[in-house]
Image (tube, grey):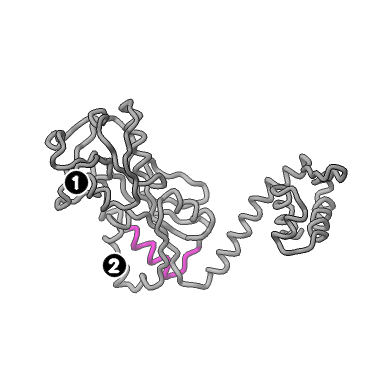
């Protein structure tokens, strides 16, 4: 069976037009027709029904079933092409969210540099949710990811490295600055500044606010941690951040939350199961493992 035929057929199911599919793949329309006929012969069932009188096309039940299977086949084929292309390279395709890159990755950068590993590294920086998709698609091979609950993904090897609590962060002039411990409900009337939606922090904010029974008034969202700190320091809002995000010289106050919410900032080293690291890549992974002792838990 020609996998190209599956690609043509999948596009036909989605676009419902032979001419449009032919244009997308830069082939003739008869090429698409012949590809569908080959598949129908291969599987012994009609896949497409054409109503020439009304110029309409419909997909049979057998066609829908084949389309569903073809999606996984084509995805696996793309991944195989990517993995084979990278097999003989020492390149380290590594993903990291900005907040982990700011807080914890610097703890091992010196070691990576001294071992000469940084020169092989291609770093992709974006939110953990997006990086997870990049891993599954085979665009990167490993990543440090954050999550509010321990990750569980069938096609990935996941090693938990740290679990840190979230804290309410307020300015030194905030009325609750001296409280030490609070319930999240006490912030119900405050404005909030937070990380943008593809990061872990908004998920934690949602969990805490749902437990406390109010909808937070988010006045500003940004992927930049330093900007969040600046807005909170200016008393323009409060925030919910992982404990290590705030340093002593930031001019901010962290408040421990007494709410029994399970969400934590979990950092994990995630590697695709199908990835076979060479010596350089394995050395990079082994160095990242040391973050478990360096970061640990913030409890």
Q: Is residue 12 left or right of residue 212?
A: right
- Residue 83 lies left or right of residue 286; in this view the side is right
Which residue is at 79% across, 57% downward? 32
- In what element is the residue under mark 1? helix
Asked which secondary structure carries label 2, the reply is helix
Q: Position of residue 64 (x, y in %)?
A: 73, 43
Residue behind mark 2: 111
Instruction: Kindly report which numbered mark, 2 or 1, lies closer to the viewer in this rendering.
Output: 1
* 229 to 88, vertically: above or below: above
- Residue 44 in magenta? no
The disc, 2 or 1, on the residue closer to the chain's N-terminal end is: 2
* Image quadrant in which the C terminus is located: top left
User: Magenta residues?
Assistant: 276-289
Residue 199 in percent (x, y) is at 38, 47
Along the line of sight, the residue nearer the viewer: 144 or 186? 186
User: Could you say which is closer to the camera, residue 180 or residue 160?
Assistant: 180
């Amino acid at each position: 069976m020609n996998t190209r035929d599956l690609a043509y057929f999948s596009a036909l199911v989605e676009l419902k037009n032979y001419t449009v599919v032919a244009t997308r793949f830069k082939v003739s329309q008869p090429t698409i027709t012949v590809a569908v006929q080959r598949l129908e012969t291969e599987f012994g069932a009609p896949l497409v029904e054409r109503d020439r009188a009304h110029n309409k096309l419909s997909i049979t039940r057998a066609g829908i079933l084949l389309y569903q299977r073809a999606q996984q086949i084509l995805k696996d084929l793309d991944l195989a092409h990517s993995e084979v292309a990278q097999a003989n390279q020492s390149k380290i395709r590594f993903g990291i969210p900005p907040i982990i890159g700011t807080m914890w990755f610097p703890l091992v950068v010196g070691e990576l540099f001294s071992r000469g590993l940084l020169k092989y590294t291609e770093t992709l920086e974006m939110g953990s949710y997006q990086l997870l998709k990049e891993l599954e698609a085979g665009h990167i091979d490993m990543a440090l990811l954050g999550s509010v609950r321990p990750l569980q993904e069938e096609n990935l090897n996941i090693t938990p490295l740290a679990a840190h609590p979230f804290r309410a962060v307020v300015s030194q002039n905030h009325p609750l600055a001296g409280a030490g411990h609070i319930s999240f409900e006490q912030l119900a009337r405050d404005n909030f500044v937070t990380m943008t939606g593809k990061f872990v922090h908004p998920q934690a904010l949602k969990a805490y606010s749902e437990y406390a029974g109010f909808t937070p008034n988010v006045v500003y969202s940004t992927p930049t941690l330093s900007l969040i700190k600046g807005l909170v320091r200016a008393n323009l809002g409060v925030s919910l951040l992982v404990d290590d995000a705030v340093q002593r010289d930031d001019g901010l106050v962290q408040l421990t939350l007494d709410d029994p919410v399970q969400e934590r900032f979990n950092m994990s080293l995630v590697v695709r199961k199908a990835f076979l690291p060479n010596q350089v890549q394995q050395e990079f992974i082994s160095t990242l493992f040391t973050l478990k002792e360096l970061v640990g838990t913030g409890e």
